[in-house]
Image (cartoon, rainbow, N blue to C red):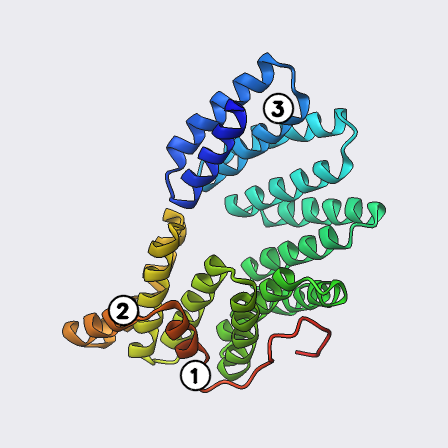
Amino acid sequence: MRMWILGVANTLCGLQGDFASGLEFTRESLAIAREHDDRSAIAANLNNLAVTQSLMGNHSAAKEYCAEALRAWEDLGEPASAARILSNLADISKAEGDYAGARSLHEQAFARFQVLGDSSGMAWSLNHQGDVARAQADVPAARRVYEQGLTIFRDRNDGPGIASSLHDLGRLASEEGDHVHAQTLFAESLRISRQLGRKQDIAGLLEEMARSATRQGNWERALQLAGSATALRQRIGVLLAPVEKVKLDADLEPARRGLPEAAATTAWMRGWAQSPDEAIEYGLAGTQGSSGSFGRRGI
């Protein structure tokens, strides 16, 4: 029971951005698992330690925990869990800037999921491969694998997967300057996320829309969307990881500098004061998208 409570505590700490406390809870949980020789719990805690260390920027420690977790799952004969660890290891390599290593590991994970007939794992692996290609500025490759993943998610009628792929494709389109298409993709993702009640994903989409508005020089819209996203994160207790907050602040800086200080503050506070539904409707304003159906449809 205590091990389960510690796991819940780690999750809550992660949502609140208190990674140091989460690390301590997970270490205690791992010690209990080792004491009872609970091999599945040992492997799961090792993975949690790897994820937390990676979020804290401690990539070397994260890779060590991942490698130990991978051996543990393979010893247990749990190929699906081992494949997911490979994917986590790939994400750590990407965070380190080792894109070739990350791509290779994701391809290995994809191959394992394919052997298992795990279409969900395959789709998420493709999604992560798209992230690596995007980080390398290989836009055609990123778009290709994102779309491949989206096709699988649509075939599965997997709402969260569809929304995530649309989010990623929208971000890619925005970065390429195709803001009309980006807004259409964001809008469909936002509708699905609202239908599923995925508030953390909604906050992320509002932030991505704010970035897109900044790129278009629409300063007030950018800051209002960002204010809404921040308020929503405060309501649900899920803060941005520090490294992600730094990136977002840098991306929004042109909007803050583009307006008089009073106007920038007003726009931000207008977003902060919106209810989640009002923020979603503002994000959707001026778009034409889907009704939220998860079925196959072209993008």
- Crowding at mark 2 (Cα within 10 Å: few <14, some 14-19, many 20+): some
Q: Spatial distance from mark 3 to mark 1, Cα to Cα? A: 48 Å
Q: Where is the N terminus found, in terms of image quarters?
A: top right
Of badges 2 and 3, the one in the foreground is 2
SS at badge 2: helix
* Residue that numbered label 3 is attached to: 42
User: Tag 1's secondary structure?
Assistant: loop
Residue type (three-letter) at the residue carrying disc 3:
Ile
**Relative to 112, is 132 above or below?**
below
Query: Residue at label 1?
Result: 285
Q: Position of residue 119 (x, y in %)?
A: 77, 55
Amino acid on which the number 1 mark rests in the picture: Ala
Give the CA distance from mark 2 to mark 1: 17 Å
Tell me which label, 2 or 1, sits earlier in the chain.
2
Q: Are marks 2 and 3 in contact (CB under 8 Å)?
A: no
Residue 278 percent coordinates (x, y)? 37, 74
**Lower position in the chain sequence, tag 3 or tag 1:** 3
CB within 8 Å, label 3 to label 1: no
- Image position, residue 21 (x, y; %): 38, 31
The location of residue 168, given as percent across then percent down, is: 57, 65
Q: Quadrant of the C terminus?
A: bottom right
Identity, as a three-letter code, of the amino acid under mark 2: Ala
- Callout 3: SS: helix
Residue furthest front in the image: 1
Q: Is residue 149 above or below residue 81?
A: below
Give the residue displayed 20% in from the left and 74% down from the top.
266
For disc 2, the marked residue is 273
